[in-house]
Amino acid sequence: MAFLSIISLVLAAVAAGEPLLGKRQALNQSIPATTTLNGSATINPTAFAMPFVLNVEDMWDLLIGPVSSASITTTVSATPVPSSSLIPPPPLYYSPFPTGQQYPMESKNESWSFPKDFWWGVAGAAFQIEGAVKAEGRGPSVWDALGRVTGFESNNYTADITNNNYYMYKQDIARIAALSVKAYSFSISWSRIMPFGSGPVNEEAIAHYNDVINTCLEYGVIPMATLYHWDTPLAIQDTYGGWLSENIVNDFVEYARVAFGRFGDRVQYWFTVNEPIVFCDQYPLPAQYFKNFTIPYQHQPYYCGQNVLLAHSQAYGLGKQMMPNSTISYKNNGGYKVPLTNSTADAQAVQRAWDFNEGWFSDPIFLTGDYNDNVKTYVSTFLRPFTTAEKQTILGSADIYAHDAYTAQFYFAPDAGIEACLADTTNPLYPACANTSYTYSAADGNWLIGAAADPLAPWLHKATDWLPAFLHYLADTWAGDKPLAVTEFGFAEPFEADKTLLPDILFDPVRSSYFHDYMRAMLVAMSEGVNIAGCLAWSFYDNFEWASGFSVRFGMQYVNFTEDTLPRYYKASFFEYKSAFDIYQEK
């Protein structure tokens, strides 16, 4: 399905609340100069466009097409979690019968502890869990469109239903509360609040998220809200290119104003955007489905990044005005970067990797208000520089250093060297010019850095032994006197989606080992002086994992997607995660 040339004008008018009939003048202004109106011949007939009224339902029909609905389409009240579901697996717990197992119990390390106010919790994202994509006035996002691109999604899955969290959130919150989880990090769907990305506010969406927040508070769970987790409203993507245009800055800040104003009296913790390194690197979006823009493909991620910094920093400033006691940040991401060898070239490659990943956003926000030298050298050839006022707004626009810290990997210089890479803009490693590996060097035996996750998550390995060094680096390089927060970490159990026996699915040994070792590595870092405020595990249940659909599983709860009621079951890893706080958190 191709996008129609009229959509950008139509959506802009709808978002502004303007009538579309009679918009002849605006249409005329949108037609290239080579086109002649009033009955004369035209050089470019593809520029013809006709105005018409477009509502949210029309937008779904025109741009997306049919969507699936769950069997449950009203909000479900929570029911008590059966006590039988709260029994941890061995070796965390031994039932009276049968007897005879022997396990060398780990003694408690009395030098480790999580402070009483350390918040530990779980995370999810709106598009990945909510489903109900057309319910109660939600507009489509770019990911609703991507799900219709043949071959883009694993097995052509969509998130039309996914976990149906939109109607089952009360039970989902009750289930995490039953395991004494302290915090729940969820994202708000921008296109639910503002179906066109700007303009009218959807009061039904406001009522929904109000109840999500109130349900958290009812169960004693801290609500933490993310404004944007990759689901750009389709209207603004098609109108002006989404994050490619500075137009998004004002639209995002206005969306933030609505969210802060409606929910800020009960939500203290806010994240503006999730992992800009990832969603900016998704540009350019697939040309066969989205409108093309004139920005060269290789530059598009950095236009996105610049607009993210502007939007985030302005939303932060607004949030601190509206909610002075709030904690606001954004979520960075990336793994620990280990030089493959002790060579100078590999050390330089590691630094360039930091600069073009975490440093891309961390340096402006935490250190200087502007890009680091390596990034600036590249982007200064096509991006406008930040103004002095913008630098002042960007610098310091985060109250904590929030990082999605899953793993680690090795970095090394390109085979032809860094300088040769920098001289060749066609090199696939350009502009960072740092190569990566998940195995030690040949001199060190070519061993994996850690157990591999599912093949559909090839970037993820159980490299928990590198976590203390990772956390020290983040604290020493960027956080400074601000606390760290590990806002996502988790593991995709290998081939879990292929399992069919429920007991086999629920016993996830590699993920359990990951959480066991990860929490102890965090305790080591904290005992060495790293200031960590809290952590959020990904994900609190199996969900829609973007382009991998349901083919890869990160959940600490199993969801049976083949049953209409979508039943949830705790996995062993959830109890392993909880165990760390049962043992080490101060009461």
Image: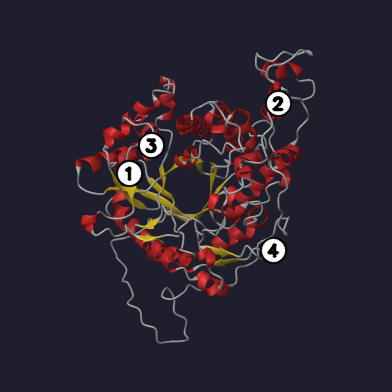
Tell me, yes or no, if residue 369 can be seen here.
no
Nearer to the camera, 370 or 479: 370
Residue 265 located left or right of residue 27: left
Count of number-bearing discs: 4
Tell me which amino acid carries mark 2. Answer: Ala
Identify the residue under disc 1: 435
Identify the residue under disc 4: 564
Rounded to the nearest angstrom, the CA distance separating label 1 from label 4 is 46 Å
Tell me which amino acid carries mark 4. Answer: Asp
Looking at the image, is 114 positioned above or below residue 246? below
Tell me which amino acid carries mark 1. Answer: Asn
Q: Earlier in the sequence, mark 3 or mark 4?
A: 3
Rounded to the nearest angstrom, the CA distance separating label 3 from label 2 is 36 Å
Residue 83 located left or right of residue 475: right
Question: Could you classify mark 3 by the number of other residues whose Cα lies within 10 Å: few (under 14), some (14-19), or many (20 or more)?
Answer: many
Identify the residue under disc 2: 13
Rounded to the nearest angstrom, the CA distance separating label 3 from label 1 is 21 Å
State yes or no: discs 2 and 1 in contact (Cβ < 8 Å). Answer: no
Q: Earlier in the sequence, mark 3 or mark 2?
A: 2
Tell me, yes or no, if residue 419 can be seen here.
yes
- The circle on residue 362 is 3
State yes or no: discs 3 and 1 in contact (Cβ < 8 Å). Answer: no
Q: Secondary structure at mark 1?
A: strand
Q: Earlier in the sequence, mark 1 or mark 4?
A: 1
